[in-house]
Amino acid sequence: MCQVFLVLFRTCSPLVGFSAMQNLLISCVPEVISCRVCSRSDYNGCTNLRKYVNSDDPSPPCTLLTPLAGAQLAFPHAEVLYEEGCTLNTSDSSRIQSAVRAAKDADVAVVVVGLVSGDGFSGKLEGEAFDRVSISLPGRQRELVDAVVAVQPHTIVVFMSGGPITEPTLLPWNRQRSPGTGSTPAALVQQFYPGEMGGVALFDVLGGAVSFSGRLPVSIPKSLDDVPKYLDQNMSLGKGRTYRYAEADALFPFGYGQGYHMAAYANVHVTPAVVQRGMTQAITVTADVSLLEHRLAATTMSDEPVAAQVSVEEVVQVYVERTDGRGVGSFRPLAELKGFQRVALNTTTPHRAVTITVPVAALSLMGDDDHYGLIRCDRA
């Protein structure tokens, strides 16, 4: 289940595609991967970690499997190297060069950076009753990433956090790259606090045993300037908040996520085409989804071909958008997710017909007169 907490920002090939891989470097911020509470977020329910659970709970203690443990399980025949790289949020950069030297000798490097949460953890950088002053990587973490990427082109960077992390210059298509930032990583992945099996889930997906299928539950802004001050609960005030009202384009929008595949949509139909007040008939959205490219089927694992029936998941999403401009201030959202469906595709079944039903009540909003009514559906 914790595999869906992984969102792929930039397309990559699974690590099994590096058929000659003998050495894998794991470079992590130790507090990010070893804080037993942080990896499970503030309210985790582990009987051996939390003060909020019943002391008589018979559940077994939680055992944290880190990315290092996940890599060792996923690639038992490879030498897995580990270097800390840097600390969470200090100016200490003394360990970065050790990670760089190890990265030069490795076939692939995975750099895990991010934030920490957890009640009672003195070094936490996010969580309940805690305001962040920055949405970039703290301390020397970005310096660690740039240094490893500069010497190892097969570098995968993993953000582990509960909230968004924004590092636009790690993306090759960003035209406002900072001077001296060098190359960009082969892949960029967001892993929201995954729970005790997070390390196994990470390398299940990176190794190609499971395809990326996570989609963002929040938008990742380009910068802190795009995030309005939180002075009112009204989401539509000022620049607007959340994907439903935000005026600025996001770095990665709500619902975004890539995978080890490419899919095409055809024959998209919305029935009925016009929605009127008083209607009780549900809205039906249909589409044909086809697999264009399946990268997992072309890779090898332990010298054995990956079975053609290994599926990838395409997440079909239905939004309702307003077409009367992007002006913020109206109670009516700019866009709203109204339904989604996960579709398994593989080389045996490369085509699927998808039907998503949207209740007509889902197009209603509470008006100023406190009445819940239907609004005009501009486009689905």
Image (cartoon, helix red, strand yellow):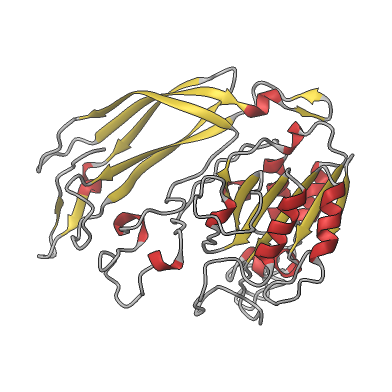
**In this orientation, does residue 63 appear?**
yes
Number of numbered discs overlaid on the protein picture: 0
Q: Where is residue 85 in the image (x, y as percent from the top left)?
A: 78, 64
Instruction: Using the image as rendered, state which of residue 70 and residue 156 is in the foreground.
Output: 156
Where residue 22 sits, quadrant-wise, is top right
The answer to whether residue 83 of the structure is visible from this angle is no
| Residue 318 quadrant | top left
Nearer to the camera, 131 or 363: 131
Left or right: 320 as drawn, with respect to 281 = right
Residue 103 image offset from top left, x and y in percent:
82, 51
Task: Tell whether 342 sits left or right of 104.
Answer: left
Residue 314 picture location, percent across and down: 50, 34
For the point 44% across and 59% down, the residue is: 221
Q: Pinpoint residue 192: horizontal percent, then vertical percent.
A: 58, 57
Extreme residue toward the top, this view: 348
Instruction: Residue at 53%, 56% (x, y): give it.
Output: 168
Q: Which residue lies at the image location 9% right of the left edge and 65% below the top edge?
A: 369
Locate the C terminus and report the quarter of the image it occupies.
top left
Could you tell whether 28 is left or right of 276 in the image? Answer: right
Judged from this view, the residue extending furthest toward the front is: 179
Position of 345 compared to 199: left or right?
Answer: left
Position of 357 relative to 43 (above/below): above
The residue shown at (12%, 60%) is 371
